[in-house]
Image (tube, rainbow, N blue to C red):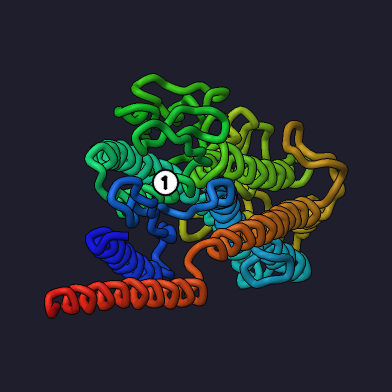
Amino acid sequence: MSIAKAITNAMSGLTATARGTETVAANLANVMTPGYARREVVVASQSVGGGVRIDGLARIVNASLLSESRLSASSLGEATTRNAFLTRMEGVIGLPGSGEALSTALTGFRTALGAAAVRPDDEIRLAQVVAGAAALAGRLNAASEAVQAARGVAQQDIASDVAVLNASLERVAYLNARISILDADGKDATPLIDERQQVIDRIAGIVPVQEVQREAGKVALFTSEGGVLLDGSLPARMGFQGAPHVTADQTLGAPLQLLTLNGAPLSAGQMRLFAGGSLAANFAIRDKLAPALQAELDAMAFDLHQRLADPGVDPSLAATDAGLFTDRGARATAADLPGLAGRLVVNAAADPAQGGALWRIRAGLQASSPDPVGQTAVLNGLLDALEAVRPPQPGSGFEGNGTMANRFGTVEARVSARRVEGQADLAVRSTRHSTITSSLMAGGVDSDAEMQRLLQYEQAYAANARVLRAVDEMINQILRM
């Protein structure tokens, strides 16, 4: 081997080891950086002149684990969003026996009726009946308002998810172009690839995403159901229009809307392309989960209204008169059921605060005289109506005969059961995501392995330095001859 070739080999080795130590340092510095992938220097022997050349840096990523991690992140995002809603609704409806439960308000109303039936002449007890009825109606109103508020929040979250999705897709398209240029120039594009991975991970929390490699370092993005998000230089453009507030009578198409894709409205069937992730969960809350709970509250409120508006309970009432509970002053009808729980109020005729008289609780809402003060028929009729075992109202969703307390208990049990199921589902998905994430990180930067690689580079550096020292001594010997 000639002296010149020995110098070339040693210098190329020193350059490669210097680049390698820089890579090890970068790996150790970014061990906890999201989206960072371990680097390794790619070297090859030079056929002409000898030595080694640096062909670039390789990002070491387990593509299959990364894909599974993104899908599990979407699944976790969906379960987290659903469980948060179900937990809030359980707090609104309350657990049986708790002070904030709907059934507790019903129990208070029934207790007040029972006490008034014992002393119908006591206006304090009659006032407690009105207060109990108002408290019960107020709890139903608050529950209905909370359900609709949750729908409004879901609608706002949809708009937010769409905005993040569009911005992220545009960023991936830009990074694709920059990576392609750097790849063509033979420059290191790994920092941009790291950033692109972070952006795609952010997309994965909104919709399940699959990454497909394209030429020149570019990637295409599709949903797990085949929807095209990005394949080329122009990303898909999602659109969504929705007011920040939603009411109980608003349904899908009247006036609630789904997504648009590149300006074209998506049908309910096409929305399956974006199933999974927080976006789909928010649509489910707005269009299915919350309306289902609202329907149960409305059916329960209607049953309560009908029981106490029965002329058999209060003979002073005509068939079209409202009972103790009204739909904002009018008699409730099955045709105008959506949102009834939020509109239910105590009949003004029995409420002194609204110009009514307490004696009407005792004598009848449409009675002409408060006498005799000892009459208990109406009060006992109201109490019996609440405790009567009756079939459910048509289309209410309730099954079997039951008392008013049974209906309240059924709704509370359903809400609690849904929360338990949602929490169990969240735990399963969270465990799966944690397992996959741990496996993905285990294949990332290992500080022990990096230190071992650093020792190898140190040894290689020392060996190349010894070659240069030997060449230097040889040249000095020749010059002294």
Name the residue nearer the viewer: 342 or 282.
Answer: 282
Q: Is residue 227 above or below residue 276?
A: above
Q: Quadrant of the N terminus?
A: bottom left
Q: Is residue 115 above or below residue 46?
A: below
Q: Residue furthest front?
A: 481
Q: Is 346 displayed left or right of 179 in the figure? A: right
Name the residue nearer the viewer: 475 or 342.
Answer: 475
Residue type pointed to by label 1:
Ile
Name the residue nearer the viewer: 87 or 100.
Answer: 87
Residue drawn 76% across and 46% down? Answer: 313
Counting from the top left corner in percent of width and height, residue 269 is at: 57, 23
Which residue in the structure is indicated by mark 1?
Answer: 200
Query: Dot 1 surroundings within 10 Å: few (below 14), some, or many (20 or more)?
Result: many
Residue drawn 64% across and 47% down? Answer: 297
Name the residue nearer the viewer: 318 or 305.
Answer: 305
Counting from the top left corner in percent of width and height, residue 446 is at: 50, 70
Residue drawn 43% across and 28% down? Answer: 255
Q: Is residue 191 above or below residue 20?
A: above
Q: Quadrant of the C terminus?
A: bottom left
The answer to whether any part of residue 50 appears in the image is: yes
Residue drawn 18% across and 73% down? Answer: 475
Counting from the top left corner in percent of width and height, residue 382 is at: 75, 53
The answer to whether any part of residue 89 appears in the image is: no
Which of the 4 image quarters holds residue 231? top left
